[in-house]
């Protein structure tokens, strides 16, 4: 069965430029592209275009532009803000980058990797590893997320503390504009101050300004030794003292510092069958350091001894092997999936200044207990970046909008952000307007209008649809 509100001649044109199999219009084929990972934002695509190269992306964009039909770019569809899902009108074309998945080059001396937008993040990581290099973006969805989506969301993950957000890793970018113009900025340069650094506009723009078709990413030498430790801490303030001690002892070898509440580990035990090797704890820290120099493990052992003696940690495990380290990380990586199985939850991907984390957590807990009694916070995240996933499991009596407001208003009191890494998508469009200054929103609108005057690129995402 074919379903579409897009003009039939457009679909004919798309089919002729994409060839057989490059355009999906059958309802069964469209289904996987129609709803997000959390199944919160169901949509109805007119069709799914699956180009095989940049020229085909350009042809699709030019055809949709001429017909005035909106385009929704989609990568691995693991985004948590509903950004890659079309609306329910049946009039938007999904542009899937999945077929453009080639790794073009890994340069171990120049420390770069060039790949197409549909390349799965894990595949790119493995290609870097095969050359003894590290692509330091790591997130639990790396087996499905694609480089174009990672760049379009400016993804964070567990290694931001050491290597920065995805933005810090993009050296060169190729994009296709709303009207089909190809802009090739695939330069593998560390230093390039020649004019505006336009690629930054597209990184984190969630498919609203252009289509990412290929990128050159920065790699780093792969640390030869890693030390991974799981520690029970009495409270978030003690976790911060541990972070400070780790910074002093290990410097920039610390590559991950994650805070996990007892509730999160309980969810992982219940829904993923994985249990923590340390006795039940109110709060846990999972930290990792990496270096190619000798002595890392000894330095971490000394640090753990000191923090245990001071009482900033009450129990701890230092992984003895890569396998044990992976088992510790599995606890952390399964939280999101376990939360999804636990029922309905309201996600808050927030950041506050790092020293404010304990006070923010206390204030948000009090505000929720007063304003939404009976909700269950599932708190975890990238403490070393000030990024807390303050997710709240709710019952049928709770409204998600009210809970959003309670948490986000608390974030605002602490000078924080309502999205640290997941982006705005369609989920936080109204909250963005509440939490950004009018001049910032007006500036964003001017950028959008300059690059997409007809408003055809992912309308209703990041900014409200329309003028
Ligand atoms: P999609 O979901 O397909 O798209 C995301 C957005 O980018 C959409 O707005 C889409 O329109 C746009 N887009 C996609 N491809 C392109 C393109 N080629 N050109 C232009 N726009 C495009 N995120 C983090 O930052 N940190 C985490 O730690 C993290 N952990 C996660 C754990 C789990 C279990 C899950 C399910 C998700 C997690 N995420 C995390 C969210 C998600 O994985 C990231 O946002 C990821 O970068 C999305 O990549 P994707 O290919 O799936 O993008
Ligand atoms: C993670 O860090 O695991 C994800 O970004 C968090 C989430 O599911 O909220
Ligand atoms: Zn995260």
Image: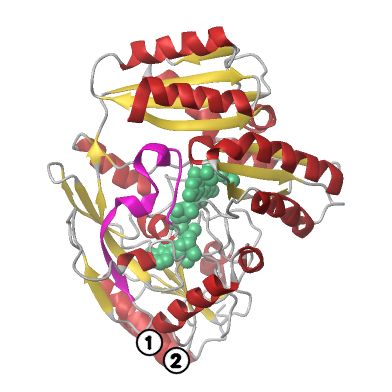
Mark 2, residues whose alpha carbon is within 10 Å: few (<14), some, or many (≥20)?
A: few
**Residue 225 x/y as whole percent:** 29, 21
User: Foreground residue, 68 or 255?
Assistant: 255
When the figure is inspected, residue 356 is found, relative to residue 263, above or below; the finding is below
State the quadrant of the N terminus.
Answer: bottom right
Which residue is pictured at 30% across the width and 42% down the height?
135
Identify whether 244 is placed above or below 122: above
Residue 124 numbered mark, or none: none
Residue 182 falls in which quadrant of the image?
A: bottom left
Which residue lies at the image location 64% right of the left edge and 34% below the top edge?
A: 358
The answer to whether residue 241 is left or right of residue 280 is: left
Please give the range of residues in magenta.
154-176
Residue bearing the label numbered 1 = 63
Q: Secondary structure at mark 2?
A: helix
Query: Around disc 1, counting alpha carbons within 10 Å, would you say few (fewer than 14), some (14 to 19), or many (20 or more)?
Result: many
Task: Give SS at disc 1.
Answer: helix
| Residue 261: percent from left, percent from top | 65, 30
Q: Which residue is mark 2?
A: 67
Residue 412: image quadrant is bottom right
Which of the two residues, 374 or 12, is positioned nearer the viewer here?
374
Residue 353 forms part of the magenta stretch: no
């Amino acid at each position: 069965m074919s379903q579409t509100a897009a003009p039939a001649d457009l679909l004919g044109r798309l089919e002729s430029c994409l060839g057989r199999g490059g355009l999906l219009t059958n309802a069964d084929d469209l289904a996987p592209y129609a709803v997000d990972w959390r199944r919160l934002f169901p949509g109805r695509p007119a069709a799914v275009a699956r180009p095989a190269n940049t020229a085909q992306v350009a042809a699709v964009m030019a055809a949709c532009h001429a017909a005035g039909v909106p385009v929704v770019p989609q990568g691995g569809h693991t985004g948590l803000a509903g950004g890659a899902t079309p609306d329910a009108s049946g009039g938007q074309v999904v542009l899937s980058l999945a077929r453009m998945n080639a790794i073009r080059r890994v340069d171990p001396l120049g420390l770069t990797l060039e790949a197409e937008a549909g390349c799965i993040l894990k595949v790119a990581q493995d290609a870097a590893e095969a050359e003894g290099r590290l692509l330091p973006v790591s997130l639990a969805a790396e087996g499905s997320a694609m480089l174009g989506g990672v760049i379009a969301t400016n993804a964070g993950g567990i290694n931001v503390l050491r290597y920065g957000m995805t933005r810090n890793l993009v050296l060169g970018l190729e994009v296709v504009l709303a009207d089909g113009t190809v802009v090739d900025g695939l330069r593998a340069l560390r230093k390039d101050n020649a004019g505006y650094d336009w690629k930054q506009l597209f990184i984190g723009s969630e498919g609203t300004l252009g289509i990412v078709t290929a990128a050159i990413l920065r790699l780093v030498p792969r640390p030869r030794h890693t030390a991974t430790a799981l520690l029970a801490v009495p409270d978030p303030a003690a976790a911060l003292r541990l972070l400070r001690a780790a910074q002093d002892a290990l410097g920039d070898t610390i590559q991950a510092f994650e805070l996990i509440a007892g509730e999160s580990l309980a969810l992982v035990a219940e829904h993923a069958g994985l249990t923590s090797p340390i006795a039940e704890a109110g709060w846990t820290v999972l930290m990792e350091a990496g270096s190619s120099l000798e002595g890392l493990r000894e330095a971490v052992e000394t640090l753990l001894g000191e923090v245990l003696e001071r009482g900033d940690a009450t129990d701890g495990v230092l992984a003895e092997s890569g396998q044990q380290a992976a088992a510790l990380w599995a606890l952390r990586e399964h939280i999101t999936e376990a939360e999804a199985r636990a029922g309905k939850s309201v996600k808050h991907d927030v950041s506050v200044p790092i020293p404010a984390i304990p006070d923010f957590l206390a204030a948000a807990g009090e505000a929720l207990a007063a304003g939404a009694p009976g909700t269950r916070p599932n708190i975890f995240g990238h403490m070393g970046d000030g990024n807390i996933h303050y997710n709240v499991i709710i019952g049928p009596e709770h409204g998600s909008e009210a809970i959003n407001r309670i948490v986000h208003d608390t974030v605002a009191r602490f000078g924080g952000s309502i999205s640290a890494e997941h982006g705005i998508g369609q989920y936080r469009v109204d909250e963005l307007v509440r939490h950004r200054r009018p001049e910032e929103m007006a500036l964003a609108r001017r950028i959008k209008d300059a690059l997409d005057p007809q408003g055809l690129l992912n309308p209703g995402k990041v900014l409200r649809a329309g003028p």
